[in-house]
Image (spheres, rainbow, N blue to C red):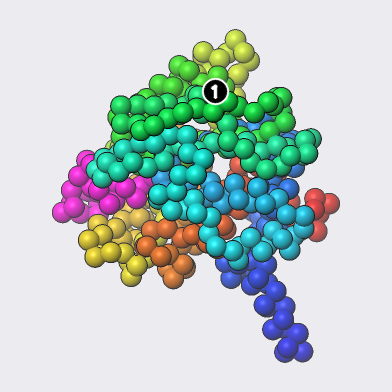
Amino acid sequence: ALAFLALLLLLALRYYPTGGAPEASASGAVLTPLCGRDVLRCASGLDPQPWFVVYGDSVSRGLFFDIAELIEASPGGRAGCAALGWGQPHPGHSANYSDNCVLFERRPPTLRSKCAAFEFVAALPSRRRRRLHRVSALHSLAFVQPNATAGPYRPLGPPPRKRGEVMRLGFRLKAFAWEAGFDEPWLRALADEAAALPDAIVLSFGLWDMQYPQQAGSSSGASVAERAAAFAAALQTFLSRLGDAIDAALARLSARRERKRPRLLWLSVGAIASRALPAWKVKLLHSNLSRAFNDAAAPLLRRAGVSVLDMYTESSAHPEASPDGVHYPGAVSRSHAQRLLRQLLPGCRRAEGSRES
């Protein structure tokens, strides 16, 4: 009997790689991990053609590639889906990853050239091809535009597609809560140039505001409360400008019957695994500041109609999973990606044992 229980425990840990129980819905029903085929099936029920944009930092880029990997693998069964949690993290978690990059930028304070945008499309179940393919940022994601600090940029021709047959996934780098030189061009493109509005915009920032306080309107010697107040002020500026840009886009696109506002989600600032930080970051980044940033952001996000995905709780429970003190590639990030998918695709909120497989 003990051997049988041990076997069940081993299978549970293998199936749910974060080492905890299966995720539960708000009603308490147990939810199974989503596979790529689940995501594509659920996305195919959205109208119009589903389009999700991530505008955030390297943490959200990791989730973006976790989701891309899940869809691209599109395994045939649940065992294959669970096995994804045991492989190496997607190389997109690396700050220097640039495969299929559509835009390079040099951003202060380091001014190192890095990839700042990716975009993929995934064929929905109505088509045979299920793998991800690059599409042109210039044609299909008007938000991605070269600017004064951009490096080489060569748009690609978009693959043939019809309305409702593909799901689009876009990532655009955002470092600080408010960075006028980069946020303003993106917001202008959204307001004045975007041919349509995405179904959802996922936001993620805060780590750079912690790591480079001078660029974030604060200082390294400021108190936690003062730094949180500076972050809140920058966030309020961004949220106000974002709301204005969406309003302008809706007014411009009203003749095309584009009346639906994108859903807005923010990934809260995760916990800091101090033992893994390099020495120079220890005084700048810590979990007390993460909590202060999240607390300061909460009322502003609520008033702006932005939902929050909690990234702090699970990361704080697994400091050993962070190789650098701020990122949690592997099981923790994949767990966050699963929760994000359920937020983006409400139709995928299916309890284990339901008719949805």
Q: Front-most of 29 and 153?
A: 153
Q: Position of residue 332 (x, y in %)?
A: 52, 61
Number of marks in picture: 1
Q: In the figure, is residue 163 to the left or right of 209?
A: right
Density class for disc 1 (Cα within 10 Å; few <14, some 14-19, many ≥20) is: some
Residue at 53% from the left image edge and 46% from the top image edge: 64
Dividing the picture into quadrants, the one containing residue 286 is: bottom left
Q: In this picture, is 295 found above or below 83?
A: above
In the image, residue 133 lies in the stretch drawn in magenta: no
Question: Which residue occupies the extreme top position in the image?
Answer: 255
Q: Position of residue 139 (x, y in %)?
A: 54, 23
Q: Position of residue 14 (x, y in %)?
A: 65, 71
Q: In the figure, is residue 346 to the left or right of 150?
A: right
Q: Is residue 230 visible?
A: no
Q: Is residue 73 visible?
A: yes
Q: Front-most of 275 and 288?
A: 275
Q: Front-most of 177 and 303?
A: 177
Residue at 33% from the left image edge and 41% from the top image edge: 113
Residue at 46% from the left image edge and 60% from the top image edge: 328
In the image, residue 215 lies in the stretch drawn in magenta: yes
* Residue annotated with mark 1: 139
The image quadrant where one finds the N terminus is bottom right
Q: In the figure, is residue 349 to the left or right of 253?
A: right
* Numbered disc 1: secondary structure: helix
Q: Which amino acid lies under the numbered mark 1 shown in the image of this protein?
A: His
Dividing the picture into quadrants, the one containing residue 198 is: top right
Q: Which residues are magenta?
A: 205-230
Q: In this picture, is 333 found above or below 57?
A: below
